[in-house]
Amino acid sequence: MKQTMNETKPSGWQRRTILFLTSQCITLFGSTLVQMAVVWYATMETASGAWVAAFTVCSYLPQFLISFSGGVWADRYSRKLLIAGADALTALATLAMLLAVPHITSKPFFLGGLLLMSVIRSLGAGIQTSAVNAVIPQLVPEEHLMRCNGINAAMQSAVQFAAPAAAGAIFTVSTLDTTLMIDIVTAILGIGLLSCLSIPSCKSQGQCSSFIQDMKAGVNYAFSHRTIGRLLILYGLFTFLCVPAGFLAGLFVRRSFGNTYWYLTAVEVIGFGGMILGGILMSLKNNGQSKTRLLSWGLFSFGAFAVGMGLSAYFIPYLIMMFFYGIALTVVQTSITTLIQKHTDVSMQGRVFGLLGTMYSGFLPLGMALFGPMADAFPLSWIMVGSGGALILMGLYSKLL
């Protein structure tokens, strides 16, 4: 029987939740800043697609490999210590790279060091993400989960909105070293705030079982549960079909509207702006509204705007649809997160969200590997329309959850 979460909620949950989300946004800002700065540095210094692809793989593949294991650890050990430890691991990797910079004179060796740092940071992110999503239901009463997840989505989108501008400003007046130092400072601040927070311990019911047994139990639990299993598969397919209109947006804009940095910047700003508004709107939803209906509406709208973006002949209408595309994206992600938190036993939260992270970090590179080369063989607009149509069908299917 699912545990009653309200029984573990001490008073003042709002204050603790704000403190927790703030600590995670601070560390997310530093991590996003470094991730963008490293890819930009590789792009500017090498102008090599191979190097850029290598950094992309190093940013996602380790996270894919570690996410489910991180979820198991989140159910076996202290989630607070896991989050702080993951932050400390990434900060130490960044510090080691910062200290090594003056002693590396070969550009290939320097880029190799950045790749290694990206691998370690990706491993830390895979461990941290599962624990963070599992902590939220421990702090927030079930009836407020949707609002809390909406606030979290808005805060994270705002951070991701600000990070590119900050990275550009830093590179204009300083060097990569400054960016690495900022990440170390934000990690220290985030860990400091987290240390002030009391998080109830929630160990797995099978504490004496082996790690492998816990992994098998997590997979069996997730996919034997009708709703959770379908949500995980739905999220994987959603991530896969996001690639043409979302992650290949820069390529579409360059081919369809012109190769200017202003266009590319406008797309990023408008997209994140929509995501911020989407998070705010989700935080205002009342408790009685159907989360399944919101998910269905979000998927349907997301697909419809993807189709519209693929058919756009002018840049301004494309930007308008990108804005609403960002809103729909947040609606889908927040609805799926809340539904999983609602239906998952507290002792299984880490493993289920580990599987959710595996779906994201696995299906995204798979989509890039398929749709990227396909976009060189067929018009990208056709691919966007096709993927958008599939998302519309998924929206209709999600009503059956």
Image (cartoon, grey):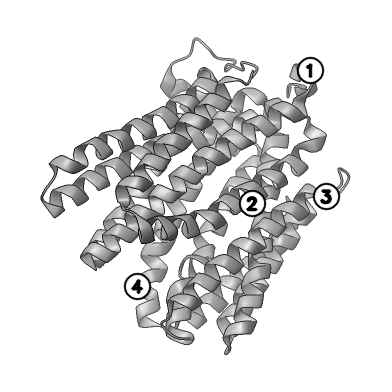
N-terminal of the pair, mark 4 or mark 3, is: 3
Which disc, if any, is residue 285?
3
Q: Is residue 10 left or right of residue 271?
A: right
Measured Cα–Cα span from mark 2 to mark 3: 15 Å
Q: Residue at x 75, y 62 (%)?
A: 297
What number is the disc on residue 333?
2
Q: Could you tell me residue 298's position as x and y percent?
A: 71, 61
Q: What number is the disc on residue 7? A: 1
Can residue 331 be spotted in the picture? no
Residue beneath label 4, please?
373
Q: Which residue is farthest left?
A: 106
For marks 4 and 2, the one nearer the N-term is 2
Label 2 neighbour load within 10 Å: few <14, some 14-19, many 20+: many
For the residue pair 170 and 22, the one nearer the viewer reads as: 170
Per the model, the C-alpha gap separating discs 2 and 1 is 27 Å
Q: At label 3, which amino acid type do we have?
A: Lys
Q: Residues within 10 Å of mark 1 (few under 14, many from 20)?
A: few
Q: Earlier in the sequence, mark 1 or mark 4?
A: 1
Cα separation between marks 4 and 3: 40 Å
- Left or right? Give the position of 97 relative to 214: left
Q: Is residue 241 left or right of residue 40?
A: right
Q: Report the residue that reaches farthest toward the front.
A: 173
Q: Quadrant of residue 97?
A: top left
Type of the residue with mark 2: Gln
- 10 Å crowding of disc 4: few (<14), some (14-19), many (20+): few
